[in-house]
Image (cartoon, grey):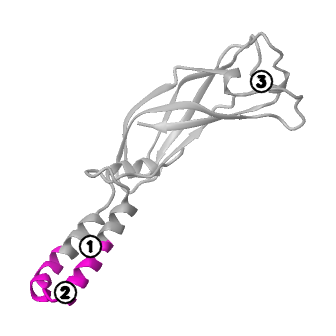
């Protein structure tokens, strides 16, 4: 699973940006204390420090999404024209220190890696089809708990052109939780 930069819950801004702004505010406060208006600015310095601490708050609970481990347990081999779609199944584990609700796991094709020594030609995600990509979990997982998911299917798309370049290719699947 890919974890992306998590914005703070109420700001929509990345944590690094807010910390940089807080640092600039502290520097500005120190400079004001040293200026001619030092006494008045000195009273503002604690407020600036409180603002800096407030921006360093913990990211939203969405951060725990990155602590979900999603593993595929099915082995999808021998995808070929005319073969029946194969079931995709797996397990999601909560590695977070707190409980996390998992509504569903969604699968998508991240890419295709051609087999070593494959014949020349194109082989990409358009050569494969995923169906029922949203697999319900509907569980509150405590720390260390797991749940299984299944339901999506993958198959090979039979195109009008030669697809020998896809023989032995590896389809890279991407999983996301919601």
* Position in image of residue 73 (x %, y %): 61, 36
How many numbered badges does the structure rendering display? 3
| Residue drawn at (39%, 52%) of the image | 63
As measured in the structure, the alpha-carbon distance from the residue carrying label 3 to the one carrying label 1 is 60 Å
Q: Quadrant of residue 1?
A: top right
Read off the residue under disc 2.
33
Looking at the image, residue 109 sits to the left or right of residue 145; the answer is right
First of labels 3, 1 by sequence position: 1
Read off the residue under disc 1.
25
* Position in image of residue 39 (x %, y %): 10, 88
Magenta-highlighted residues? 23-47
| Residue drawn at (52%, 24%) of the image | 133
As measured in the structure, the alpha-carbon distance from the residue carrying label 2 to the one carrying label 3 is 72 Å
**Which residue is at the front of the view, 170 or 42?**
42
Q: Is the residue marked by circle 3 packed among few (<14), some (14-19), or many (20+) residues within 10 Å?
A: few
As measured in the structure, the alpha-carbon distance from the residue carrying label 1 to the one carrying label 2 is 12 Å
69 above or below 27? Answer: above
Q: Secondary structure at mark 2?
A: helix
């Amino acid at each position: 699973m890919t974890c992306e930069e998590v914005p703070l819950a109420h700001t929509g801004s990345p944590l690094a940006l807010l910390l940089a702004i807080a640092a600039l505010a502290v520097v500005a406060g120190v400079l004001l204390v040293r200026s001619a208006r030092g006494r008045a600015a000195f009273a503002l310095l604690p407020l600036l420090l409180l603002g800096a601490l407030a921006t360093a708050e913990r990211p939203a609970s969405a951060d725990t999404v990155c602590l979900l481990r999603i593993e595929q347990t099915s082995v999808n081999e021998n995808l070929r024209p005319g073969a029946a779609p194969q079931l995709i199944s797996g397990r999601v584990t909560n590695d977070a220190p707190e409980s996390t609700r998992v509504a569903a796991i969604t699968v998508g094709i991240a890419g295709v890696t051609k087999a070593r020594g494959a014949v020349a030609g194109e082989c990409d995600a358009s050569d494969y089809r995923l169906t029922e990509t949203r697999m319900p979990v509907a569980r509150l997982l405590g720390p260390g708990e797991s749940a299984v998911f299944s339901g999506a299917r993958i198959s090979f798309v039979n195109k009008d052109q030669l697809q020998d370049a896809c023989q032995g290719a590896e389809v890279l699947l991407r999983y996301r939780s919601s």
